[in-house]
Amino acid sequence: MNDHTLAKQKLLVVGACAWMLSGCMAATSDEQGADEYEDTTGTQNPIVGGSKASGYAFAALVDMYSNGYPSAACSGAVIAPRVALTAGHCVLGESGWKVTLPYAGKQSQYTTKASTTYKGYGGSVDPDSQDLGLVFFDQPFDLPAYPTIQGAELPNGTKGMNIGRIDNGNFSTTDLFVSQPLTLNDAASYGFPYDYIASEIIQSGDSGGPVVLPGGAPFTIVAVNSGAGGGTEVLARTDAVASWIAQEIQNHGGAGTSGGGGTAGGDPGGDDPGTEACQGTAEAEPNDFHHPQTLAGTLCGKTDGPGDEDWSTWQVAGAGVHYEVAVSGGDARVVMWKYVGGSYHAIANATPQRITNTSNGPGPYYVAVWSPSGATAPYELSLDTN
């Protein structure tokens, strides 16, 4: 990771979240005019905004209560009909929990029953205990399938995806979002023997959200979001308490069906036979951020489920080039950055499917297409500079 001298105290729990958050709406590209982008908004790593986690029926909003009153918010996952998984610090010190499944009929239950082995306190992650908690219910949640819990530590370099209720700093009371895949490594050498460590993505309110392996059903949860700071995040490994989780599930009604079931949201399979064939260059995998495909005219691609991002690139020789980048098909969305002076600058969208502006100088552009619902569907991405 970036900081090999990471101190334990730098990683703060990311569970506490204000119920009311303020924010600003980005200016549209028409409002920006010839400025094209803000010089002060450059980033070293362009990240696609969180894709809506509607392909994960088990993903849960967790609202905490203290003495009968709302106190804070976390994220979580229903892992058995009567059991939800979250972070230990989302359980410790609270007296009630409301768990809602936004992508499984908005099922919701309140309970006062929970358990954790976590011993931490205050605003920092306790590295000496496992930051996982379980919440129990008298009535079952109804899901087509329940996720598998990882029971053995994964090798360094394994890819995982964070799920949580924060989308680019915006707190949601209705939705959860899934990140792009990130690299997981053992955090023991950083002083966190029960965790993975990765580049920082999670924010306040994401705590307890599941960390899942990429791919479709059956889904596997390998950790939960625990703490972050200084460009890194720690994720509490499920394998560290796998036997305890299994025993508590057995004590509270047993496991539901794992694997083989469908997931809520998204197109479950393949191209729409009613969609006219795309006339253009076919995408060639890999076309991720590090291997973007050249965009010229029309590019024919396909979103391949939750977490998939298709990247392409094009460039202008100077100022005054008016352009339009647009995507159509399924629920595909497009975002774009311009690389100038060692930083990536986001170009504002006119709509989620269209970006139009005029270049203020030379430089390459990087374009990402993804599906916020995690659908598998064809799309057309076009570039017009006339």
Image: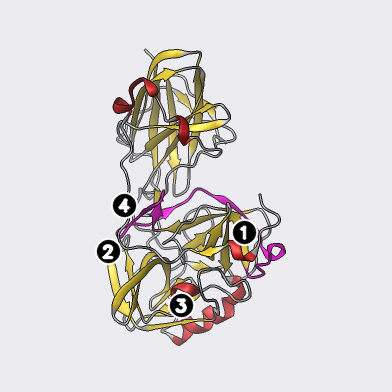
Nearer the N terminus, badge 4 or badge 1? 4
**Residue 329 in the image: above or below residue 174:** above
Structural distance between the alpha carbons of marks 4 and 2:
28 Å
Horizontal placement of 86 versus 28: left or right? right
Marks 3/2: CA distance?
22 Å
- Rounded to the nearest angstrom, the CA distance separating label 3 from label 4 is 31 Å
Image location (x, y in percent) of residue 251: 46, 87
Comparing labels 4 and 2, the label whose residue is closer to the camera: 4
Query: Alpha-carbon distance for marks 3 and 1?
Result: 22 Å
Residue type (three-letter) at the residue carrying disc 4: Ser
Q: Amino acid at mark 1?
A: Ile
**What amino acid is at disc 2?**
Gly
Q: Quadrant of the C terminus?
A: top left
Residue 236, given in percent of the width and then of the height, sits at 57, 67
Please give the residue where the numbered disc 2 appears in the rendered image.
Answer: 105
Give the residue displayed 49% in from the left and 83% down from the top.
248
Q: Residue at x 33, y 33 (%)?
A: 353
Q: How many neighbours does mark 1 have within 10 angstroms: few (below 14), some (14-19), or many (20 or more)?
A: many
Residue 91, quarter of picture: bottom left
* Front of the two marks 3 and 1: 1
The reply to whether the magenta stretch includes residue 12 is no
Q: CA distance from mark 1 to mark 2?
A: 34 Å
Report the span colored magenta.
165-194
Q: Earlier in the sequence, mark 3 or mark 2?
A: 2
The crowding category of the residue bearing disc 4, from other C-alpha atoms within 10 Å (few below 14, some 14 to 19, many at least 20), is few
